[in-house]
Image (cartoon, coloured by chain):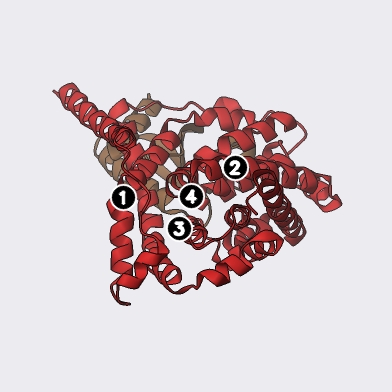
Chain colours: A red, B brown
Amino acid sequence: MANNVRLIRTALLLTFVFAVIGLLIYSRISAYSLAPVMQPADFSKYSWYEIPFQYLLDYFGHGWICLLFAFVAAGLVYEFMPKELITKYMSSSKSLGYAIGAGLAPFFTVCSCTMVPLFAGILYTGAGIGPAITFLLMAPSANILSILITGEFISWEIAGVRILVSLAAAVTAGLVVSKTPWGKTLERSRQIGQNRGVASGAIEIVKPPLDERLISALKFGVYLARQILPYFLAGLVIVSYVTAYTPQELVQGYLTGVTGVLIASVAAGPLYTPTLVEVILGRSFLSLGMSKAALLAWLMGQPWDLPNMAAVSKITGWKVVVTYAFVLWICAVTLPLLYGVTTGSI
Amino acid sequence: MKRVVAEVIGPNPPCQRCISLKANVEVAAEVLKAEGIEVEIKRLDIMSKEVLSKYGLLLSPALAVNGTVKTMGWVPDNATIEKILKESVK
């Protein structure tokens, strides 16, 4: 009896997951735009109080499939990713540490409650400061949620480039910090004992039944949605006004060329939030005439993630934080310029 | 009376998911008490030297029973926790 209930529950959950995936594929086949379709010029049709409603309607009318898929995917990936793999290999060696830090961090989504403790754990258990920094920086900038949303709402080209530049910036920052005297001092003072082989025999992960893992995955998706969507909604309202009332000349004048990259790399600072608002605001500026290079610099606004920096500086001290933030900022200027020059959109 | 030690491991201050894990463990402990198993619940800091040198790198929230990590990175429900605790007693 209990087995039957379990079976039915598993079947229902799987149906739901496949339905969500099916919706995304169907929208692809029928060429239904998942990104909002309103253009800045359309806003003049509405009076001031109608603007946010029309904008929200446009976003959710088109974007709900994408948002639903993104949250379900984030939950599933987080749940079914072999976590032991990371915790086991992340603390073993340096080069492997960089590879795993950069390669697997994107699947950890935006939950900072997981990020900072993991960062400390990597630092303490042996892989050292470099891979720890790489891991810390890679996750919020190129996690599965933000990449999916960037890809669907802006373009997959930008999303792909965003992964590459985040990777380059995160690895560079990790390498640079590990070479600084304060980075080395920190690494020595924080390492536990001489032997790196931490007692891993004390871990025997219990594999729960499939239905419970699916529920847990969906619960995590809901949890992420509840954390992010309120900011996302508030962000949409603000962005709707920005799009409606920012003169195109202003954006075309200041957010293009080298100046555009410089301004975007700094302006993203106070606005940088791991809430996907940077994606919609970036999209809106793009439609107003921002260059792609400046957009990329905008999306790399991560050196300014202040809450995260505050939490990290408690563990590492401010010198390390300032170093990696500076490296990230340099990357946020040079890499978008490089991208702009090679693609001719600057 | 049989005894079992359950350690809820998470960051300090606790994150939302660690609080739910602890709540679930407490519910499971109540149920097991009726069956004659006493569960001692501890809260450990995932970043402390003690935890890191004993278990190494963990994903929060983690649940360790009698010194062995049983789950990490997700919140098991009451029934699953009960099962894990019972198996550790044997």
SS of the residue under disc 2: helix
* Residue at 49% in and 28% down: A82
**Residue that numbered label 3 is attached to:** A280
Which residue is nearer to you in this view: A296 or A315?
A: A296
Q: Is residue A147 above or below residue B3?
A: below
Q: Amino acid at mark 1?
A: His
The image quadrant that residue A314 belongs to is bottom right
**Residue that numbered label 4 is attached to:** A111
Q: Is residue A320 left or right of residue A53?
A: right
**Residue that numbered label 2 is attached to:** A161
Q: CA distance from mark 2 to mark 1?
A: 24 Å
Q: Is residue A21 left or right of residue A239?
A: left
Q: Amino acid at mark 4?
A: Cys
Could you tell me which chain the residue with mark 3 belongs to?
A: A
Q: Residues within 10 Å of mark 3 (few under 14, many from 20)?
A: many
SS of the residue under disc 4: loop
Q: CA distance from mark 4 to mark 3?
A: 20 Å
